[in-house]
Image (spheres, grey):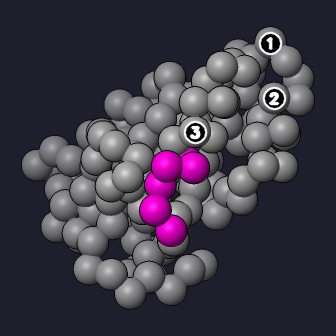
Amino acid sequence: MPSLARSNLNILVTGFGCCKQEIFATQGALYDIQRFGVNFVSTAEDADILVIQGFYNKKGITRVLNIYDRMSSPKWIIAVGSCVLNENLFKSESKLLSQFRNKVEINMYIPGCPPRPEAFIYAILRFSGRD
């Protein structure tokens, strides 16, 4: 796990899938992930962590790599959900995510279909060393 010496983390979520709703549920009053200094952003330049979830095609992988390239260093990738972890059930090319993993390092995996908001928060806190 990286040692993060920052008071907040900015997360950019990409992909199409049901995990996105569970991730964004962490912003609500019930979970309030912002109390831990975790914010969701909409531009790559503001992001510290890129969350990939859901399913991708070849064009989608290219876009995610472009987003990753635009992020400032240090930068990390967290893969969330069964679609990404199990080589993407909805893809048409069997080696698509393997090719993606060869180009970038995925720093953490969060399993589930979809993972509960509590699991996402726990993983982010573990990743940042605040657990």
> Which type of secondary structure does the marked residue at label 3 adopt?
helix
The disc labelled 1 sits on which kind of residue?
Answer: Ser
Whether residues under marks 3 and 2 lie with C-beta atoms below 8 angstroms apart, the answer is: no
> Which type of secondary structure does the marked residue at label 1 adopt?
loop
- Say whether disc 3 or disc 1 marks the residue closer to the N-terminus: 3
Query: Which mark, residue 96?
Result: 2
Residue 4: image x %, image y %?
A: 44, 82
Gap in angstroms between the C-alphas marked 2 and 1: 8 Å
- Direction top: furthest residue: 92
Whether residues under marks 2 and 1 lie with C-beta atoms below 8 angstroms apart, the answer is: yes
Q: Judge whether 70 appears above or below 75 on screen.
A: above
Residue highlighted by disc 1: 92
The answer to whether residue 118 is seen in the rendering is no
The disc labelled 3 sits on which kind of residue?
Answer: Asn
Identify the residue shown where x is 68% and y is 57%: 106
- Region rendered in magenta: 68-73
Residue 7: image x %, image y %?
A: 26, 80
56 or 120, which lies in front?
Answer: 56
21 or 100, which lies in front?
Answer: 100
Identify the residue shown where x is 88% and y is 23%: 94
Q: Depth-wise, is mark 3 or mark 1 nearer the camera?
A: 3
The disc labelled 2 sits on which kind of residue?
Answer: Leu
